[in-house]
Structure formats: structure tokens, C-alpha cells
Amino acid sequence: MSANKSAPLIEVRDLRKWFPIHAGIFSRRVGEVKAVDGVSFSVGRKETLSIVGESGCGKTTAGRALLRLIEPTSGSALYRRTPDSEPVDLFQLSPSEMRAQRDDLQIIFQDPYGSLNPRITVGNAIAEPLAVRGLAEGSELQDRVEELLRRVGLRPEVANRYPHEFSGGQRQRVGIARALALKPKLIVCDEAVSALDVSIQAQVINLLKDLQDEFNLSYIFIAHDLSVVRYISDRVAVMYLGRLVETGETRQIFDDPQHPYTKALLSAIPSPDPTKRSELIPLTGDVPSPINPPAGCHFHTRCSLVEDRCKETYPESVELGGGHSASCHLLS
Ligand code: SF4
């Protein structure tokens, strides 16, 4: 495959992550949870793609499978370190080959407390990836840690403190500093601000945007809070029951949504301007189980516009122009 200067940083094609279900005394395989079922998207350099949807839609699984923190069932993820690089398919790499790519591909979790060892100072936590790879030692390592702390808005003196001595927002800054240590190209932000107070959320999001400009970072921002998503994203992918139902630029999704599910999600965002409040489109019932998703369009059990054909055939993705696409029979 030839190098392509306009090629995205990463191109995910037909990603599937099915979890087997075992039952009985012989633990026979009796089915699968199709948590992610044929998802395709790409992320450009210095671009933020948000993946949104209700709890249980598969967005977190998609992010983790992409980084192979859990092994994908099938699909491909072509990664180009530079625009001129030949792509490598992350899903085809051996564990040692994947380790070599992992420095470029980092993740920030919702609960940084869970990902920080309570018995290790935050300075050592940030230093660890640098030290393990032999990228710095002694005073140089200390300088790098202090610089990273400064860069995420923390005083270098806090390096000797333990995670429990920090607030949630400060711990998330430590998580960001740790993710930044190896100069990544892509960071998956997995509900990274969801657990923070609104004012702290804004600070951390502004920090992420500043760091993106400074380090040319790309983000996959996994979230359910659409107000936050609107602010941080270049493009948005809306996920429902393991599949993407609508993808587009942020303004396309927010100003001209086409899929009934996207419209329902957006109608629930409170607007401070009473003249701009849209009519609430209720989402009735819960997301169906991915073990036994509804036939046809998976959304048909909750869609107010459902037709007979929706119950039989899954709708093809329809190109709407300008990179905007959606999967709904009413659009074809
Ligand atoms: Fe609703 Fe049918 Fe469109 Fe699915 S395909 S979103 S059920 S109208």
C-alpha cells in the first residue's frame, strides 16, 4: 500500500468485539454479547472524534478494543505514525510489536484513582513509563516529571504526594500527565471528565484542547454528555447497540441531525436560551440487550417513526454529503 499524505492517523474498519456466553456444567458456548458489531471510523491528525451513546451502547468497548486493551474479535485498525508512513494494522501485530506502538496510543480513564497505584507517589507514576523504556533517568527523569506536572497545571512539588491527597480534577491531571509522558499521537479519553464537577470539567477540557494544539494530539473522546462533546469535537459518531447510526462533523450532528436516535439524544440537552429549546423527543424504555438485539434496525423498539421494513432489515448507511452519514430507512 502506498503512503498517502492525506491519510488519517487511524482508520478502523468493521471492528467487532463479541464476548462469548458460556453455560451449563461443561461451560458450552451458547451465544455472544455483540458489544461492538461492525464499527468503522477514522481519526485525522490533531482531530477529535467523539463516540457518543447511552450507557451499554459499546462505546467504551470500542475504544479499548482499538487499543487492544481487550482483544478485538475481528476488523482492522490501520495506523500511520506519520502521513508518509506505511500503515500498520494494529490488530495483526504480535504482542511485542503492539508494545512498540503502544507509546503512541494512550488512554485516560474516567476514574484516574483506579488507574493510579495508591502506594506510588504521583511523581513515580508519571516517571514509570519513561523509566521502563529507558528514556530518562536521574535528574533528567525528575526534570521531565516536573515539566509534565507543570504542563497539566500542577506544581512540581506535588510529585512526592500520593493519589489520595489529590482532588478528582487533580488526579485527572495526573492521569493526563502520565498519558503525555511518552509523547503519544492518539489519546482515547474514556469518559475522562464524566465524574468531575462541571467547573472542573471545563478546566480539564480546556487543558485537553491546549495540549492538543501544543502536541498535535488526536483524541477519541468517549462520552455521554453531549454538551461537552459539542465543545470539544471536530466530528461525532453516534453509537447504538454496538453499531454507529450516524457520523458527521460536529455542526452536522448538532445542527442537522438525521437519525431519529440522534434527534432524541439531542432533544434532551437543556438549553439556557428558551427560544432555542427543542421539543423533547422521549426515548422510551431501556437499550435492548446486545445478547439478543432486535431484528432489523436495532432502534426500532424505541423509535416513534418505526415502519414495517424497520423490523426486518438493518438499514444501510446513507451518505448525506460532506462526510455526514446515517443508517435509517427513512433516508434511503
Ligand atoms: Fe426508526 Fe426505522 Fe429509522 Fe430505525 S430505520 S431509526 S426504526 S425509522
Image (tube, rainbow, N blue to C red):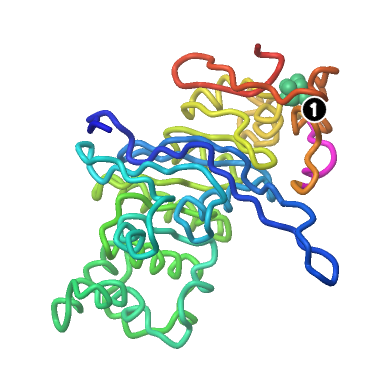
Quadrant of the rendered image containing residue 297: top right
In the picture as drawn, the residue positioned furthest to the bottom comes out as 119
Give residue 200's position: percent from left, percent from top: 48, 58
User: Which residue is found at the position 47% from the left and 65% from the top?
Assistant: 169
User: Which residue is found at the position 39% from the left and 64% from the top?
Assistant: 95
Quadrant holding the C terminus: top right
For label 1, the residue is 303
Q: Tell me the element at label 1.
A: loop
Magenta region includes residue 316 = no
Residue 255 seen in this snapshot: yes
Q: State left or right for residue 171 relative to residue 177.
A: right
Foreground residue among 24 and 213: 24
Give residue 101's position: percent from left, percent from top: 31, 57
Residue 199 seen in this snapshot: no
Which residues fall within the magenta stretch? 282-289
The kind of residue tagged 1 is Cys
User: Which residue is found at the position 84% from the left and 32% from the top?
Assistant: 301
Q: State left or right for residue 321 relative to residue 78.
A: right
User: Which residue is found at the position 51% from the left and 22% from the top?
Assistant: 252
